[in-house]
Image: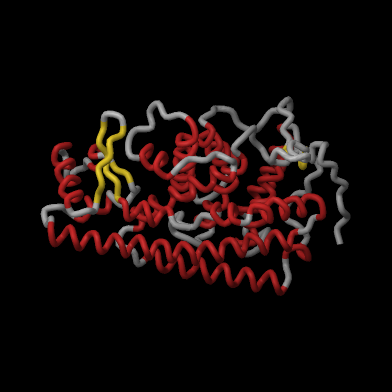
């Protein structure tokens, strides 16, 4: 058994152990049972998604839920109405929480595109995701930034330091390099990808390499890891809603890994998160696809001049502006407005005035996305 490294929450944890954890900490019969259940649920989700006629339509829709939930973990709240109206048009001049959510989604998609192109992680990608989330140009936090993690809340313990991450660029770089090596070298570190997902999620949060946005960057890393390890083809499984629903356990178990090197409970938590979220996502995608098929059939019967691709676009997010619908098939803004008005007459879309612009709400889709 490995010797416990002394830990003081008020001192930079420069002795944070490198990966991997000792095998006896992460491999057990119970652990493998959890791995098997989570992998089975992911395989079902991956297979179900392949049957969809247009995966990108539903991926974009579901990613909005993750963007909103992930920022809520950081106490960045935005209403569905505010968020979707924001996403219906240009992000120019956006401020506040809606912009934070939009940046998260943009960072997710840029990371996904990078993984698709290069097939592996590196520190550069993590910095790129962080910079997109926070709209900054800096990278790993410098040593003068005395970052600490404090207990949330306004009670008697509110503001108490619970963790001080490693400090010093060389130390942080060393631990990030080790993390990246653990993720990409499947011969040297021959662990199930979901074990790697759980272990790397903790390790990234413990390294806490950036001034801010570490939680959101770490959650995107987990999504991209599932893509890179071929567990999923597209980013359709998001863990933030599960973490919000089980937030106390999330922080308590992270802390137990730090203070006691208690890996098994933490890994089981993450495996359960993957399993339950995969099942939830299958049901949610099924509901969205069923609504899309019914809507498409109604439009085909009543408005046969409107192409299927137009209907798909109103399912990319609940609010849509006429200009967002322009493409090679619809080049006229007046035509886009006309089609939306015709769909409003059928009760599919609801017009709303936002500033000087009229945008249109797919009310049934919004209701599906708002359900937990």
Relative to 313, say whether 31 is above or below. below
In the picture, which quadrant includes the N terminus?
bottom right
- Depth check: 172 or 253 in front? 253
- Depth check: 255 or 133 in front? 255
Residue 190 left/right relative to 313:
right
State which quadrant residue 49 falls in. bottom left
Asked whether residue 225 is in view, the answer is: no
In the rendered image, residue 259, in percent from the top left (x then y), is placed at 81, 51
Identified at 87% across, 53% down, the residue is 4
In the rendered image, residue 189, in percent from the top left (x then y), is placed at 67, 59
Residue 33 left/right relative to 108:
right
In the rendered image, residue 295, in percent from the top left (x then y), is placed at 24, 59
- Depth check: 175 or 255 in front? 255
- Depth check: 316 or 190 in front? 316
Relative to 279, say whether 227 is above or below. above
State which quadrant residue 301 falls in. bottom left
Asked whether residue 64 is in view, the answer is: yes
Identified at 40% across, 26% down, the residue is 93
How many numbered circles are shown? 0
Residue 144 left/right relative to 37:
right
The coloring applied to the image is secondary structure
Identified at 59% across, 28% down, the residue is 138
Identified at 61% across, 62% down, the residue is 194
In the rendered image, residue 293, in percent from the top left (x then y), is placed at 26, 63
């Amino acid at each position: 058994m490995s010797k416990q490294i002394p830990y003081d929450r008020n001192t930079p944890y420069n002795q944070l152990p490198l990966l991997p954890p000792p095998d006896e900490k992460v491999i057990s019969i119970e652990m493998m049972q959890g791995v098997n259940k989570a992998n089975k649920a992911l395989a079902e989700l991956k297979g179900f998604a392949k049957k969809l006629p247009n995966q990108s339509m539903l991926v974009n829709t579901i990613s909005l839920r993750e963007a909103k939930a992930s920022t809520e973990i950081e106490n960045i709240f935005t209403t569905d109405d505010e968020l979707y109206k924001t996403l219906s048009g240009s992000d120019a001049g956006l401020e506040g929480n809606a912009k934070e959510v939009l940046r998260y989604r943009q960072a997710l998609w840029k990371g996904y595109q990078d993984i698709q192109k290069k097939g592996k992680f590196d520190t550069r990608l993590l910095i790129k995701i962080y910079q997109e989330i926070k709209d900054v140009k800096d990278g790993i936090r410098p040593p003068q930034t005395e970052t600490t993690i404090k207990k949330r809340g306004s009670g008697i313990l509110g503001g108490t330091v619970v963790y001080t991450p490693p400090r010093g660029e060389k130390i942080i770089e060393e631990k990030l390099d080790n993390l990246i090596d653990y993720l990409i070298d499947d011969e040297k570190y021959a662990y199930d990808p979901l074990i790697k997902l759980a272990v790397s999620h903790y390790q990234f949060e413990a390294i806490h390499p950036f001034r801010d946005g570490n939680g959101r960057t770490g959650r995107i890393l987990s999504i991209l890891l599932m893509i890179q390890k071929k567990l999923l083809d597209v980013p359709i499984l998001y863990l933030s809603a599960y973490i919000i629903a089980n937030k106390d356990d999330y922080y308590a178990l992270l802390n137990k890994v730090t203070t006691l090197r208690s890996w098994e409970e933490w890994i089981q938590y993450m495996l359960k998160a993957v399993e339950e979220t995969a099942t939830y996502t299958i049901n949610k995608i099924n509901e969205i696809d069923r609504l899309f098929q019914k809507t498409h059939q109604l439009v085909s019967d009543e408005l046969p001049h409107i192409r299927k691709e137009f209907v798909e676009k109103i399912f990319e997010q609940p609010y849509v502006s006429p200009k967002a619908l322009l493409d090679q098939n619809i080049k006229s803004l007046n035509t886009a407005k006309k089609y939306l008005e015709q769909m409003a007459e059928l009760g599919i879309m609801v017009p709303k005035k936002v500033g000087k612009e009229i945008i249109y709400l797919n009310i049934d889709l919004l209701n599906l996305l708002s359900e937990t």
